[in-house]
Amino acid sequence: MFRKKIFYKKNSLKKIYIFTFLFISSFSLYFFYINNLIFTNKEYFIIEPVKNDFFIIPNDTGGKIILDYDISILKNHINDNIDSSKNNILFDSNYSIQLFASINFDDISKQKLFYINKFNLAEKNLFTIKINTNLDSFYMLLFNTYENRDDAILNCANLFNKTINCIVVNLQNINN
């Protein structure tokens, strides 16, 4: 005789529920999402144009404040008063002693007065030259002219008593 099951095991009921749930969810997924994406050209959302400021730069950004050393490669050198007649005499010689160099002409003028007062140098022996580079112009304060390097080193040692280190500059290598 054929037996009829009155009671089912829990495992078989779970399998039936899971199977029906997966079947219904896959069918609904296909119908609502995949079918609509493939067969229709509907827009699902619209990106509205930005009407307000997109970003704001705050006045105080915080962080470390970087000091301004007043170094500018775009600075105009209008106020330099270099005597070109003295520089023509300067470039007829071979060597000179560099006392100071700076990109600021005012610093050169201050150092020129310093050397005149401290070491009693004659102003006619101090020369200021301007050297132009790709980035900026800078100035050199030179003392006296010499025909050879040894005379320049000896005169520097005698005149300044080793209070400053002498830099002897070959004037023929400087582009005027």
Image (cartoon, grey):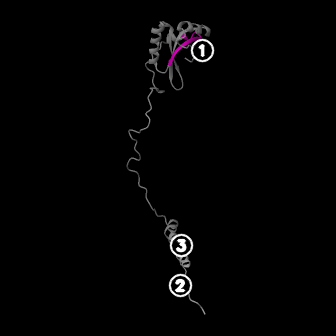
Q: Which residue is mark 2?
A: 7
Type of amino acid at the residue the image marks with label 1: Gln
| Count of numbered circles on the image | 3
Mark-to-mark CA distance, 2 and 3: 25 Å
**96 in the magenta segment:** yes
Quarter occupied by the C terminus: top right
**In the rendered image, is residue 148 in sight?**
no
At which x and y percent is residue 76? 45, 24
Quarter occupied by the N terminus: bottom right
Q: Which mark is residue 172?
A: 1
At which x and y percent is residue 163? 52, 11
Type of amino acid at the residue the image marks with label 2: Phe
Q: Which mark is residue 22?
A: 3
Residue at image coords 45%, 32%: 66
Q: Nearer the viewer, residue 6 or 37?
A: 6
The residue carrying pointer 2 sits among few (fewer than 14), some (14 to 19) or many (20 or more) residues within 10 Å by Cα, namely few
Mark-to-mark CA distance, 1 and 2: 114 Å
Tell me where the magenta segment starts and ends, as one range.
90-101
> Which secondary structure, mark 3?
helix
Q: Earlier in the sequence, mark 1 or mark 2?
A: 2
Residue at image coords 47%, 16%: 108
Q: Nearer the viewer, residue 43 or 111?
A: 111
Does 131 appear above or below 9?
Answer: above
Does 93 appear above or below 136?
Answer: above
Looking at the rendered image, the disc whose residue lies closer to the viewer, 1 or 2, is: 2
